[in-house]
Amino acid sequence: MSKIITISREFGSGGKYIGILTAKKLGIPCYDRDIIEKIAEESGFVDDFIKRVTEYAPSKSIFAYSFVGRGASGESIEDKIFAIQEKVIKELADKGPCVIVGRSADYILRNYDTLDVFIYAPTADKVKRTMNFKGVSEREAKKLIKETDKKRSINYKYYTGKTWGERENYTVMLNSTELGIEKTAEFIAEIYRRETEK
Amino acid sequence: MSKIITISREFGSGGKYIGILTAKKLGIPCYDRDIIEKIAEESGFVDDFIKRVTEYAPSKSIFAYSFVGRGASGESIEDKIFAIQEKVIKELADKGPCVIVGRSADYILRNYDTLDVFIYAPTADKVKRTMNFKGVSEREAKKLIKETDKKRSINYKYYTGKTWGERENYTVMLNSTELGIEKTAEFIAEIYRRETEK
């Protein structure tokens, strides 16, 4: 079975770009949220689901997650979307070595041979990066970071029963500011190369 | 300023041995708790302090920590010991590149150029390792792991005001079971080599 790299990341830590860089270094594909959603849509798994979900205010979605118990009867739209993405992610993993960013892939692929990476960074650097890349104010950047990670955390807890960002879920956790974006990608690629050598 | 590797670790994760291995690979010295305490004692910094502290039951010590506020007036014996070890650790760091295991060295050397590593492992593996190395029962191993890490956590909080094991305090966090003890040491050495290249 081929080895898959999953990358979980704090918003603004550069995790998505690190995923792309790592994949490039290893000559394997990188799938992020957008690509996974696009594939799900194109493959015909998703018809009106995604469209209907996007009509929901994100805050309302978060609110709903908080109060819905695991295993409650009656599948929500989010549950259906998750099931579809689970299927898509497994199919991508079955194709061969790749990098998958986000989407609780570390949990979805728990029975696969994976290298589970978590990328984090000091808040000040995440704010700076978000301001640069999203062209928002400091205040908006802080809000975006907080809300996105909160959503990720609630989502992860709901679907996996585990705590997002807790070390026990990952093989390595890397501070992208202290190591540097480029070197972080290089270390992940290096670990992957050595792990797949054996 | 030379670069120092600090290693914090969960009890039973193999962190101490990883520290020794890493230092060996890099040809630099490794100082762990025992060595630091020995140097403190031999240097004459410690006379009756350590002896007096060892008379305290560890559980009593933990209990005391929990209820002593930071910055409370009147230095406790633990405070004096910490001040001495702080001095010893800084002197060791001033001597040149080295690996320092435990003793809140990541915090003590916060103004130094450091690579701060945290080593963790799944509980089952920590229990197995503790049973093997300490020759204790499964029950005793579990107790030892829980109590040691609790003590480390309380101690770290008391002296640093930060949370032990929280990702923001470290450059990298590595799962020694998933990577393997030998490879974990190799990765730390590799990161160190690349960081000191620049």
Image: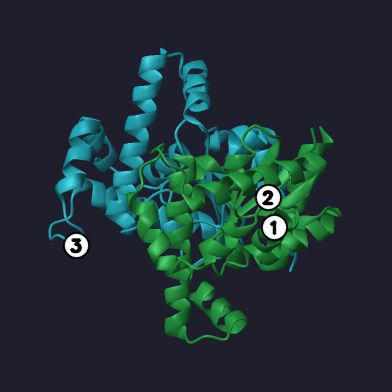
Chain colours: A cyan, B green
Q: Position of residue B75 (x, y in %)?
A: 47, 44
Residue A21 image-quadrant placement: top right
Q: Amino acid at mark 1?
A: Glu
Instruction: Identify the amino acid type marked 3.
Output: Gly
Residue at mark 2 to residue at mark 3: CA–CA distance: 60 Å
Where is residue B117? Give x, y as percent. 62, 50
Q: Secondary structure at mark 2?
A: loop
x, y percent for residue B152: 49, 57
Which class describes the residues within 10 Å of circle 2: few (<14), some (14-19), or many (20+)? some
**Which residue corresponds to mark 3?**
A71
Q: Residue at image x 69%, y 34%?
A: B112
Residue A54 found in image quarter: top left
Q: Secondary structure at mark 1?
A: helix
Q: Position of residue B189 (x, y in %)?
A: 77, 52
Which residue is drawn at the image coordinates 53% and 74% (left, top)?
B125
Q: Are marks 2 and 3 on the same chain?
A: no
Work out how far the residue at label 3 is from the one at label 1, CA to CA, in angstroms.
59 Å
Report in which chain the residue with disc 3 lies: A
Tag 1 subunit = B
Q: Mark 3 and mark 1, same subunit?
A: no
Disc 2 and disc 1 in contact, CB within 8 angstroms:
yes
- The residue carrying mark 1 is B41
Q: Would you place residue A95 above or below residue B125 in this image?
A: above
Comparing A150 with B46, the one in front is B46
Q: Residue at x 39, y 49 (%)?
A: A164
- Residue type at numbered disc 2: Phe
Outermost residue, front side: B48
Q: Is residue A158 visible to us here? A: yes
Residue A196, can we see it? Answer: no
Viewer-closest of B161 and A83: B161
